[in-house]
Image: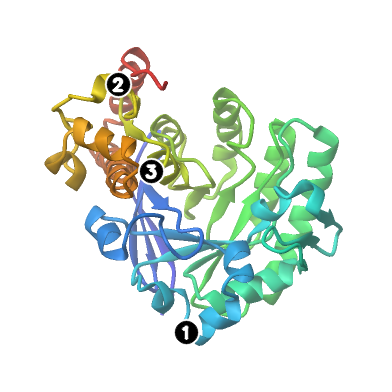
Amino acid sequence: MKHFTFNLIAQDGRGRAGTFQTPHGCISTPVFAPVGTQATVKALTPAQLEELGVTLLLANTYHLYLRPGADLISDMGGLHNFMNWNGPILTDSGGFQVFSLEDRREVSDRGVIFKSHLDGSEHEFTPENTIRMQEMLGADIIMVLDECATPYEREYNEQALERTHQWAERALAVKAREDQALIGIIQGGIFPDLRKRSAEFISSLDFPGVAIGGLSVGETKEEMYDILDVVEPILPKEKPRYLMGVGSPDDIVEAVWRGVDIFDCVLPTRMARNNAALTRTGRLNLRNAPYRSDRRPIDQQCSCYTCKNFSRAYVRHLIVAQEMLAASLLSIHNLQTLISLCNDLREAIIAGRLDKFVEEFRAHYQKHRPSET
């Protein structure tokens, strides 16, 4: 019996609706995965996530390796048991976090030596040991170690690309567990020829899915969309496509229109902790004075727990009073916004009206975007 199967249910233009079967459940795509960096989605319980309809969570290998340790989590029965989440889990390799350390790391063909942001202790990540760590964590979907270069430096991207490709082959060679799907990652910055080369190479390897990394890291939205246009025709149609670290409503719509299936991002929960709400017309900063006596829900079209039960005025009061409930209520709303958006995109693809959906979204999002300040 195969542990992982991806079935394309419908396609409209480049947009795809599919199902990705994993050992812990079936994921309907397009799908947004909330980020639970340290085995928790900040301010929310697993029961609340289940109620929201979350079907995939992301956890971070770098952070869990440092604290509490992959060996402890393995002894506790793996991530699913440790965090009491019965649905599919994806762990990233920790590469992005390591490469974000800049002055705390040294990169070689072997791997990366870095100093912990917690206590300064020295550690090494290699393509091989990051696979072993993720096998101990026990996630359904795991990622290769890659080198995420800054988007505009061509020479650096050329070097990082070759290293990422070598590391992908090494990761495949040591992977042992059949109940985990190892995903390869495309890199190449904003350079179309490098992205094309990377897409062709990663797609040629025996990965059950392909990820697009190194985007939403400083380039413009237009440059990101251009890169998606470059790589999409190359990607295998029979495998799921994962755009890493992207999660604003407009980016999800544009990427689904360009053939992407899976998304993750800290944006919805991070924005919630910074007093902001996501809507399909833009962002609301609920600390702003005009919301002090606003009786309306955050979004009158939203059916989440927050919007069904509380006013903007109440949420603003919680923010001003520095009550923890504010982050929880805003996180519920922001995640519901992205989850329902992915569900509606899926329905539009199945119905053959994706272009119309995208056209209407663009017009509404651009013309009636509330102030972000």
Closest to the observer, 337 or 348: 337
User: For mark 1, what is the residue?
Assistant: 76
If the image is split into quadrants, where does the N terminus sit?
bottom left
Label 3: few (<14), some or many (≥20) within 10 Å? many
Instruction: Name the kind of residue labelled 2 in the image.
Output: Ala
What residue occupies the far top of the structure in this picture?
367
**Disc number lying in front (2 or 1):** 2
User: For mark 3, what is the residue?
Assistant: 16
**Disc number lying in front (3 or 1):** 1
The image quarter in which residue 177 lies: bottom right
Q: Is residue 124 left or right of residue 209?
A: right
Closest to the observer, 308 or 355: 308
The image quarter in which residue 353 lies: top left
The residue at the point 29 percent across, 27 percent down is: 357
Q: Is residue 113 left or right of residue 208?
A: right
Q: Position of residue 76 (x, y in %)?
A: 47, 84
Label 1, secondary structure: give it.
Answer: loop
Q: Earlier in the sequence, mark 2 or mark 1?
A: 1
If the image is split into quadrants, where does the C terminus sit?
top left
User: For mark 2, what is the residue?
Assistant: 289
Label 3, secondary structure: give it.
Answer: strand
Q: Position of residue 270 (x, y in %)?
A: 45, 43
Instruction: Name the kind of residue labelled 3 in the image.
Output: Arg
The residue at the point 13 percent across, 41 percent down is: 308
Q: Position of residue 195 (x, y in %)?
A: 68, 39
Q: CA distance from mark 3 to mark 1?
A: 38 Å
Label 2, secondary structure: give it.
Answer: helix
Label 2: few (<14), some or many (≥20) within 10 Å? few
